[in-house]
Image: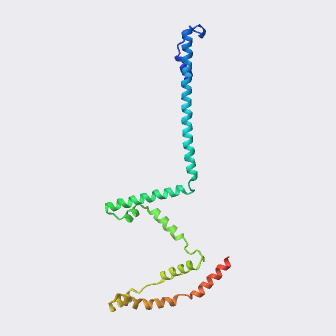
Amino acid sequence: MMAAEAEAKVPVDCAEEGELPPAAATELAAQKREQRLRKFRELHLKRNEARKLNHQEVVEEDKRLKLPANWEAKKARLEWELQEEEKKKECAARGEDYEKVKLLEISAEDAERWERKKKRKNPDLGFSDYAAAQLRQYHRLTKQIKPDMETYERLREKHSDGIESLWCYLHPALSQWRGVLPNIQQSSSRNTRAFHRRN
């Protein structure tokens, strides 16, 4: 296309080149040569530019391939944490409670979905080791404890010392609680047998 434009610019007085005077023929040849060299330089520059862009893309692709597989998730998490910190600072500057502002942004549908998800989770994964079994049993039993606040208040008023009133209240409650507990040795041997049967 450029060559066609260049040829159109060249003045042609005669129908054939052979009829041009020698000075005009050399001038025409010089112009064509100059046009070809200019076009060659342009192509050379385009090639170099394409090579540089290709090299940059190869380097970027290599960097992406060297990153860990979960890099995008980590990056999104870090960005989310930064946004949370900024929101906390903004709320602190305005004198608002961040947790309340955050809860106002959550829709009722999302809150219901998260609650259903929490209920579906089964924290009891079975016997994995003794420490986990003991911790689960501890949490289960402490949730069952119902403190008698009336007795506690009465004992606290009766004994002005904080420590003494606490001991007077806790001693009978703990003895009652210990009576409810199953024998640890029996439950641990039962769990051990169940564990060995599974494996």
Instruction: Indicate the position of residue 7 as horizontal and vertical percent values.
Output: 55, 18
Question: Along the line of sight, which residue is nearer the eye, 30 or 7?
Answer: 30
The reply, left or right, for residue 29 in relation to residue 144 is right
Looking at the picture, tell me which residue is in the foreground, 145 or 85.
85
- Residue at 47% across / 65% down in the picture? 112
For the image shown, how many numbered marks are present on the structure? 0
Point out the image quarter for the C terminus.
bottom right
Residue 148 in which image quadrant: bottom left
- Residue 80 found in image quarter: bottom left
Looking at the image, can residue 9 be seen? yes
Horizontal side of residue 95 vs 2, given as left or right: left
Q: How is the image coloured?
A: rainbow
Identify the residue shown where x is 55% and y is 35%. Answer: 48
Residue 107: give x, y in percent of width and height.
Answer: 43, 61
Vertical side of 44 occupied by 144: above or below: below
Q: Name the quarter where the N terminus is drawn.
A: top right
Residue that appears at 34% across and 91% down? 159
